[in-house]
Amino acid sequence: MNLRGIIPALTVVGFILAFWTLAVIPMNAHLTADQAQRDGLVMSPEEPRDRQAYLGLVLALKNPAIIPLTYSLDRPRLPSPHQVAAEMFETIFMKSPTSRRSLVYHGWVTLSATLLGFMIGTTLGIILAVGIVYNRTMDKSVMPWAITSQTIPILALAPMIIVMLGAIGIQGLLPKSVISAYLSFFPVVVGMVKGLRSPDGMQLDLLRTYNANANQGFWKLRLPASMPYLFASLKIGISAALVGAIVGELPTGARAGFGARILVGDQYGPLMILWAALFGAAVTAAALVGIITLIERRTLRRMGMAGTS
Amino acid sequence: MAYLIALSIWAAGWFINARLAHGPQSDTRLVSLLIPVIFGVTIIAMWQVLVTMLDVSPIILPAPSDIAARFVASTQTLWVDFKQTVIMGAMTGYIIGMVAAFAIALLADRSEFLTKGILPVGSFMAALPIVGTAPIFVKWLGSDWESKSAVVAVMVFFPILVNTVAGLKDTSGMQRDLMRTYGAGYWPTLFKLRLPAALPFIFNGLKIATTLALIGAIVAEFFGSPTVGMGFRISTSVGQLALDMVWAEIVVAALAGSAFYGLMAFIEKRVTFWHPSQR
């Protein structure tokens, strides 16, 4: 993204943040009114039950005194952006990364499973794609299933895989990686097959006139030609892998990782833990996609294909 | 022995497929359909043989016959779960998200500046693990299907938005000039030129969103639901180690997913029959 593209994007982000900040008032108005009354302020209407009849926004306008207070609740329904930012700063920078209360620690647990699974899934995906392109039987048998798999919510398999692998004694990192692996596997297969097939007849004919054998055809034409497709799939694959690792942490009540933080925040702790984990996961996803985009740009530029994707 | 039988099933399936794939009629529709079906049957047969003959415990991998039996025995439960999760959770959310995405796309379309901002931000948001917001919506809207629809709506919103905005930009200056020479204003141009031109993009987003909708509705139920629903059934059956039930739900999810996608692809085919990719 060039500099001129950043300003409109930042404007849109600003819009979203402003909307969020304003939404805090009506979302938290009832809770804040209850709290303020307990602290001795006079609310109108005075009965908490009567207040339920009002929309949050109306209640806030009737009691303007509570508006600033909606931003400083301990357990808000909707925390304001600065509260989430403070929680994230606290758990990322102020805690030692090995502490269980550090978001970096939990992030690393999820990230390591994601990366391991992503590598496995991508490697297997590329191998299968090569097989599909060079073997007609494989193409006809497997490819329709690979495409169908994209329309099926295979993420729903996640809880079962954790339990299945748990039953045969595999625990910890690997079950989550398996989920990440199969989620990133199918997009890579589909994209890579498309990429390896992207050279047109003219290019293939040219190689034939050079008397190139199949091996050279693969390394010098098909594989390089598939790179833009591969990177597009990798970006889909890595974010799917991250979602897979997070969902893989939910069913067994894992004690570490973004998924575990989301559960802890949901069931026991203050909701702020959940929000921090969510944004931590979002930042991680953005960073992963960003890294792949960076590698993509450098690779394609060195291959003289910059601008084709 | 079991491995030997499984291996011979594999060899037989592969042999038939190899003959079909290299045969003279390999590109006809029937054979193109038959080959993956044979492949699927081969896998299921091997699965059946290995699980039965090696006595694999049903809490690790139930046999396909057990799954089929469970499926037939609990069609009532499966149907109720399907209604709760797919019809109420996923479909409602899908429609809300779609309408919202169209509305925002049309608004943003009035301004070049907003379009430029929404495209990168929208595709960025589409890559985020939005399904994690499920517990928040469950807290806000209760554990019934409303919270699931909300998660689904947010999940499908961004891919549809990005594709619609990109699609609305996909007319050439020449085409727009032609509309202007006809004296067409903003709305006639939109309905007669730019929306039809955007349809292939829009359907692309709608098709991506079908899978997301089901994922959102199912996974959101892991965070709290009434005692009905596919996600609820999967998580409780996993807890009871009743894996045949889990597989039966997954079969339903797979059927629902491909049917939903197929429906969108069918509508696309009917609506964008003029597009080169459909001819």
Image (tube, coloured by chain):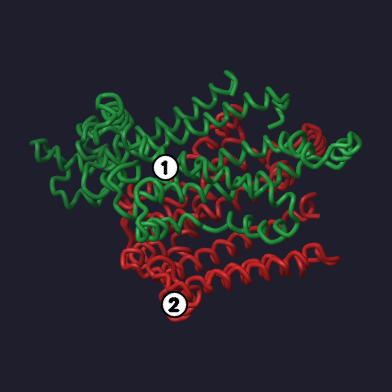
Chain colours: A green, B red
Q: Nearer the viewer, residue B70 or A33?
A: B70
Q: Residue furthest top?
A: A3
Q: Quadrant of the N terminus of chain A?
A: top right
Q: Is residue B166 above or below residue A148?
A: above
- Left or right: B79 with respect to B254? left
Q: Callout 2, which amino acid?
A: Arg
Q: CA distance from mark 2 to mark 1?
A: 33 Å
Crowdedness of circle 2 by 10 Å Cα count: few (<14), some, many (20+)? some
In the displayed structure, B21 sits above or below A35; it is: below
- Badge 1: few (under 14), some or many (20 or more) residues near its Cα, within 10 Å? many
Q: Nearer the viewer, residue B119 or B180?
A: B119
Callout 1: residue from which chain?
A
Secondary structure at badge 1 equals helix
Residue A25 placement (x, y as % from top left): 29, 37
Q: Nearer the viewer, residue B267 or B131?
A: B131
* Rendered location of residue B212, percent (x, y): 51, 52
Determine the residue positioned at 17% across, 45% down: A45
Q: Is residue B2 or residue A55 the one in the foreground?
A: B2
Residue B126 seen: no
Q: Which mark is residue A113?
A: 1
| Same subunit: marks 2 and 1 | no
Chain under disc 2:
B
| Residue drawn at x 72%, y 67% as measured from the top left | B15
Query: Circle 2 sits in a helix, a strand or a loop, which is it?
Result: helix
In the rendered view, tell whether residue A109 sits above or below residue A287: below
Residue A101 in the image: above or below residue B277: above
Q: Which residue is mark 2?
A: B70
The residue furthest right is A209
Eye-nearest disc, 2 or 1: 1
Residue A136 at what x, y percent from top left? 75, 56
